[in-house]
């Protein structure tokens, strides 16, 4: 514990970061934030949890003597009467890890969502309440994912750990329920040791739900939705009479409808009835891998409609899970300040580990968020301090640092630069470049076209940036590849 230590006396440690934030919150009476940066697999999520646990423990130790706590030697044990004890936090991490983590080529337990955890403190400086927000960007991993990578942990934990009674209720006791290898959204684990680990994780998941006072009816509803997703993957899509989409396996679709509490006809209508020529095209832009080879071209729109429905269903399920967690760790107590901890998926370059095809669109978004956060760090650490020196007329020689301190600003601006609308006092060169939009703006414009395409987006990017040499054309054959050079 670093409680009471001065900043200069603390070694570089995640607890010293937490203590610095807590001390600033008490002394300045202002909200504090901690943002974790780094590549995938560098330990950001683990450190975020240690940081939050430290804040809860340290604030309880600093509370008045009548605070509800018990101290044994040097160990502080938080009682369950506290609104946000470490036991509930550990249970929350277990649930979020099951529903939001998976194995990737870069990390055996990669976090695939962005979390913003707010720990709220009362007048005495004690942690009185907590809440978490989750951005589940990669929910489509449930239906499409890079080759060789599995889905989220919770599906394998359910299939390996559910007891016979639960499997029967979810209609997972039949071997056809999961479709076997290469069929459906989830392939059951094959190795005995993998199934044993998943079953043990399932037991911890049930215990975590009980710790957070999630009611049996609520957990049953969650398991039902998970099983329905498994069955929908087996159901598949085909074209029936009058070229209307229907389930290829009506029995699996009927199991899914029963678990969702709807009729089979209503489920089919919700998934397929609203299909139009443009809807499926826009839906496909969220997916990261091409359709499976065995899928017939005429079934593509129906397949994408099913996948969009399942991905949205899983996203809503995660939202319900977060609400249950917040219900357990929040409190109506009056709070005055907060420490916000932001944990986002780290920088990733899957091609460095031999995965063909490069990064997915979701991974591009993760990298962009990390670059944005790096830019914020650069501005707060260097730019603002430099401007403050200038305002106070203090000479500062930055020439020695400029070569060692790089900024992600050029890359970030190339990605998200908006069209210039306030070029009032600008040179002719700036006026010529005023309409140069970032790649994300160009991508958004292309997606809104009646017939968007990769080639159209790349051509627009070349037309916008080729004069500056920021893109180079690798080939103009059937498949076009371009490499961006960060100069």
Image: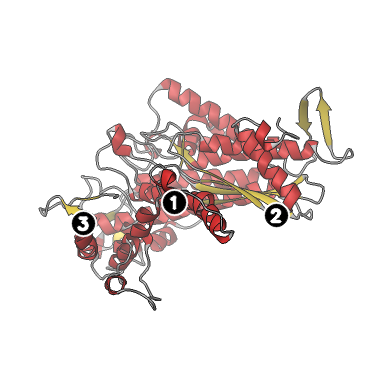
Residue 30: x and y, percent?
70, 54
Is residue 467 toward the left or the right of residue 57 in the image? left
Residue 51: x and y, percent?
63, 38
**Are the residues tagged 2 and 1 within 8 Å (C-beta)?**
no
Give the residue displayed 32% in from the left and 56% down from the top.
304
Is residue 254 toward the left or the right of residue 441 in the image? right
Residue marked by disc 1:
369
What secondary structure is found at the residue carrying circle 1?
helix
In this view of the protein, can residue 421 be seen by the observer? yes
Q: Which mark is residue 30?
A: 2
Give how far apart the Cα atoms at labels 2 and 3 are.
46 Å
What secondary structure is found at the residue carrying circle 3?
loop
Between disc 3 and disc 1, whose residue precedes? 1
Residue marked by disc 3:
469
Quadrant assignment, res 202 = top right
Give the residue displayed 79% in from the left and 53% down from the top.
333
Question: Along the line of sight, which residue is nearer the eye, 365 or 461?
Answer: 461
Give how far apart the Cα atoms at labels 2 and 1 are.
25 Å
Considering only vertical position in the picture, is 422 above or below 469? Answer: below
Give the residue displayed 31% in from the left and 62% down from the top.
443
Is residue 178 toward the left or the right of residue 45 in the image? left
Give how far apart the Cα atoms at labels 3 and 1 are.
25 Å
């Amino acid at each position: 514990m670093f409680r009471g230590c001065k900043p200069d006396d603390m070694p570089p440690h995640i607890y010293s970061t937490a203590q610095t934030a807590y001390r600033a919150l008490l002394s300045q009476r202002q909200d504090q934030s901690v943002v974790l940066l780094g590549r995938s697999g560098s330990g950001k999520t683990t450190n975020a949890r240690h940081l939050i646990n430290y804040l809860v423990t340290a604030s309880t130790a600093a509370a008045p003597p009548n605070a509800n706590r018990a101290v044994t030697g040097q160990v502080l044990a938080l009682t369950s009467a506290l609104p946000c004890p470490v036991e509930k936090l550990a249970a929350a991490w277990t649930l979020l890890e099951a529903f939001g983590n998976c194995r990737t080529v870069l990390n055996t337990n990669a976090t695939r969502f962005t979390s913003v955890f707010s720990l709220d403190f009362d007048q005495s400086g004690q942690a009185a309440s907590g809440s978490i927000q989750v951005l589940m960007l990669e929910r489509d991993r449930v239906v499409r994912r890079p080759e060789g990578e599995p889905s989220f942990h919770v599906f394998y934990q359910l299939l390996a750990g559910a007891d016979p009674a639960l499997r029967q209720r979810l209609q997972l006791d039949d071997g056809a329920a999961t479709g076997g290898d290469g069929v459906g959204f989830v392939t059951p684990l094959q190795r005995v040791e993998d199934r044993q680990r998943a079953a043990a994780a399932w037991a911890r998941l049930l215990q975590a739900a009980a710790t957070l006072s999630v009611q049996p009816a609520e957990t049953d509803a969650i398991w039902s939705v998970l099983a329905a997703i498994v069955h929908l993957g087996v159901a598949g899509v085909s074209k029936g009479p009058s070229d209307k989409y229907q389930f290829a396996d009506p029995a699996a679709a009927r199991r899914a409808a029963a678990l969702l509490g709807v009729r089979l006809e209503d489920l089919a209508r919700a998934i397929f009835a609203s299909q139009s020529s443009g809807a499926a095209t826009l839906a496909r832009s969220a997916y990261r891998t091409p359709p499976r080879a065995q899928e017939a071209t005429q079934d593509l729109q129906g397949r994408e409609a099913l996948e969009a429905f399942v991905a949205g269903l899983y996203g809503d399920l995660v939202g319900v899970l977060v609400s249950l967690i917040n219900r357990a760790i929040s409190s109506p107590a009056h709070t005055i300040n907060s420490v916000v901890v932001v944990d986002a998926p780290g920088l990733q370059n899957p091609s460095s580990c031999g995965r063909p095809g490069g990064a997915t669109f979701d991974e591009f978004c993760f990298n962009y968020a990390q670059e944005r956060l790096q830019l914020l760090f650069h501005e707060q650490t260097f730019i603002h301090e430099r401007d403050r020196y200038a305002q106070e007329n203090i000479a500062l020689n930055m020439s020695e640092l400029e070569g060692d301190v790089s900024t992600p600003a050029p890359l970030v601006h190339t990605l998200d630069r908006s069209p210039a609308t306030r070029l009032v006092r600008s040179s002719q060169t700036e006026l010529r470049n005023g309409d140069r939009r970032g790649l994300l703006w160009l991508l958004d414009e292309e997606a809104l076209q009646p017939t968007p395409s990769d080639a159209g987006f790349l051509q627009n990017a070349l037309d916008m940036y080729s004069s500056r040499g920021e893109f180079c054309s690798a080939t103009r054959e059937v498949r076009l590849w371009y490499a961006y050079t960060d100069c």
